[in-house]
Amino acid sequence: MAEMGMGKGVTAGKLASNVQKKLTRAQEKVMQKLGKADETRDVAFEEGVINFNKQYTEGSKLQKDLRVYLAAVQTMHESSKNLKECLSDMYEPDWYGKDDVDSIVEDTDVLWTDFHQKLVDNALISMDTYLGQFPDIKSRIAKRDRKLVDYDSARHNHSSTNKGKKGKDGGIKITKPVSLLERATPVWAQGILSAHNIAQSNLSRNQAEDELERAQKVFEEINEDLQEELPSLWNSRVGFYVSTFQSMAGFEEKFHKEMGKLDQNLYDVLVKLERQDMCGELPRGASPANHTLSPGLPPPIPKSPSKLRPAMPPRPESSPCRDMKPENIINLFDAAAAPNISVTSPTQAISWDTWEADTPTAASAAPTPTATAVEEIPAVATVATNGASEAVEMPPGFLFKVTTMHDYAANDSDELEMKAGDIVLVVAFDNPEEQDEGWLIGMKEGDWIQNKESAVKGVFPENFTSRL
């Protein structure tokens, strides 16, 4: 009945043997700590155990951090999915690129799922396999320590058993009988008793030798295996770390590259939608509506010239500067300040480059200049000051004047700050390729008159102004 309660395969004799081993080991460890028994040491093996524990600790931390990273990837996946689905739900069916947006949302979700799964298969599972070998080796190291104690105990027992007093002839010296049994033994039986004691001593020595051999054999078997495995395991860490992080880096690079393409596609769709909205064009399937600006409200501002700008509303088919006839050019300025110049051809106009006048009367004495093309704009204009008119030299590249319809606050350093009612002198861009659709460049007329070349020049949205 007692054996049945000890579990399968466990007998009272085996249990007693295990208890006896534990007691013997504990006694041996105490004797070694007290310095009464020597201890077998292997410095190289002890260094291998130190490296093993360090490697196991680092690997366990890496496994923990990798699981946290994968959890973060899963969280980002869910957050990205919810955000993209929110955009898809808000994106009205008649807006530009609705089908493209839905496709991008679906592809983004698939890309996140594939990225997470690859990290699990090639990093986490590989990490678990790598760390799976440590518990078994750790258990065998502990077993080796126990077998080493058993070996030391058997060695000490064998040594103490063989310590007998020997005579000069090398035989064992028998001491005089001291026990009551020996004293009571007849003289003729003393020899028999001595022979029995000698036989018992020989039996103890033989048992000690057998025990030492068994303990030594068990210890050396497990010790030899660990002596080979520990250095090999320690050296394998470099290759494992390289393989793991190379795989992760490759997966991340591919993931971000593909995600960048999807983000760019979504950006392009939204840019086109924004242009349609700013241009007042009707989206697909939209019903007609009044898209004119409300009176007194500023029009939408194009994007900064330093960035991509949406398309602006088309310019009027006729330009005041190009459709104006030569004979009407003078009407743009004060009639009292205009020189008395006759125009002889409807296809020719007087060049203003050679006309210089300080007073209205000086213009009549000027020589007749050479005729130039109709589209050439005068480089000199007149402004009225205190009831009188005086000539004002226009800035280089002057094209035409505009009046500001709404206040405009500059968003970048290259933009021109304007207030409603400001007169702006529009000039040509130094590099025509730098001009963006819907934007002009120039300076305030008052600033030019006062500061000339030092006047502040900047770009501004054309739809905030009106040509004079």
Image (cartoon, rainbow, N blue to C red):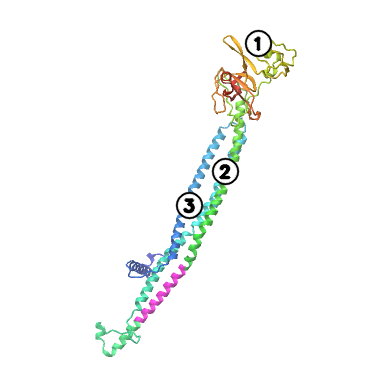
**Cα distance, mark 2 to mark 1?**
73 Å
* Helix, strand or loop under label 3: helix
**How far across and how far down the image is residue 343, in percent?**
73, 12
- Mark 1 against mark 3, which lies toward the viewer? 1
Asked where in the image residue 450 lies, by quadrant, the reply is: top right
**How far across and how far down the image is residue 97, in percent?**
62, 33
Camera-side residue of 120 and 240 = 240
According to the picture, the residue beneath numbered tag 2 turns out to be 256
Position of the N terminus, as image quadrant, is bottom left
Q: What range is drawn magenta here?
A: 201-223
Camera-side residue of 385 and 106 = 385
Lower sequence index among marks 2 and 1: 2
Q: Residues within 10 Å of mark 2 (few under 14, many from 20)?
A: few
Position of the C terminus, as image quadrant, is top right
Lower sequence index among marks 2 and 3: 3
Q: Is residue 121 visible?
A: no
Question: Which label belongs to residue 362?
Answer: 1
**How far across and how far down the image is residue 134, in percent?**
47, 59
**Cα distance, mark 1 to mark 3?**
92 Å
Question: Chief secondary structure of the magenta span?
Answer: helix
According to the picture, the residue beneath numbered tag 3 turns out to be 62
* Helix, strand or loop under label 2: helix
